[in-house]
Image: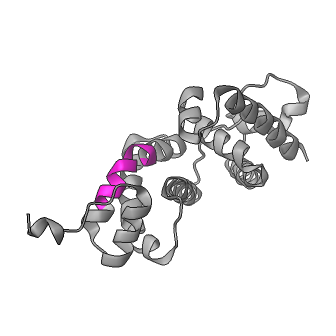
Amino acid sequence: MFLKRFRKSKPTNDLEYVAAYRVTGDLAILGELYEQHMELVYAVCYNYLRDEEEAKDAVMNLFEQLVTDLRRHDVQQFGPWLHSVARNYCLMQLRKSQTHPTTSLVTETGNDTEDEPLNRLLSEETDTLELEEDLTRMETFLKTLPPEQQTCLTLFYLERKSYTEVADLTGYDLKQVKSYLQNGRRNLKICMQK
């Protein structure tokens, strides 16, 4: 009982884990935090790299990268930050290997001519450099959307969450989630057409 008073309590959320790691540099703490997000990181990596072994390697390399990155950056929202780090890592790998991802953020439209920039993203015939350029533009435009639309689009399309999961994660009701997704897709399409 006496020793319990002097033991430090175990972190209970991402921010506490990040703070504890930054203070101590203890890789066990970072490992516990990363393990909670490893499935998401793998899903993001596989979504971009489309190869099981490459995605597994990326997950391991990203952990090594976090050892230094988390000490340099003041991270307030670990999940979204980690998602961005994983995505950027994968894009760098794709640039190095000159292969292209087959992910799409906007997929619910038909063959309308007004959707040409988005359809080009989905086409297998698109050359690698054009596709990479379009993906980079889409990521840039995604960041210009209102935060609610950006969050919903990221969770739904990039992290492959269901409507219900997006609602649970964000606190929005189901109608709001569907509205943010619809408006976000429309706004993204408008940006891509310019």
Percent position (x, y) of residue 57? 37, 53
Residue 69 position, x and y percent, is: 46, 72
Residue 36 located within the stretch drawn in magenta: yes
Q: Position of residue 100 (x, y in %)?
A: 60, 46
In the image, taking residue 145 as reference, residue 83 lies left or right, namely: left
- Which sits in the foreground, 31 or 138? 31
Q: Position of residue 24 (x, y in %)?
A: 30, 76
**In magenta segment, residue 177:** no
Q: Residue at x 56, y 56 (%)?
A: 84
What residue span does the magenta drawing correspond to? 31-41
Horizontal side of residue 134 vs 190, given as left or right: left
Q: Residue furthest top?
A: 110
Residue 127 in view, yes or no: no
Quadrant that contains the N terminus: bottom left
Observer able to see residue 113: yes
Residue shown at the point (40%, 49%) measured from the top left: 37
Q: Is residue 153 above or below residue 26?
A: above
- Which residue sits at x=43%, y=76%? 71
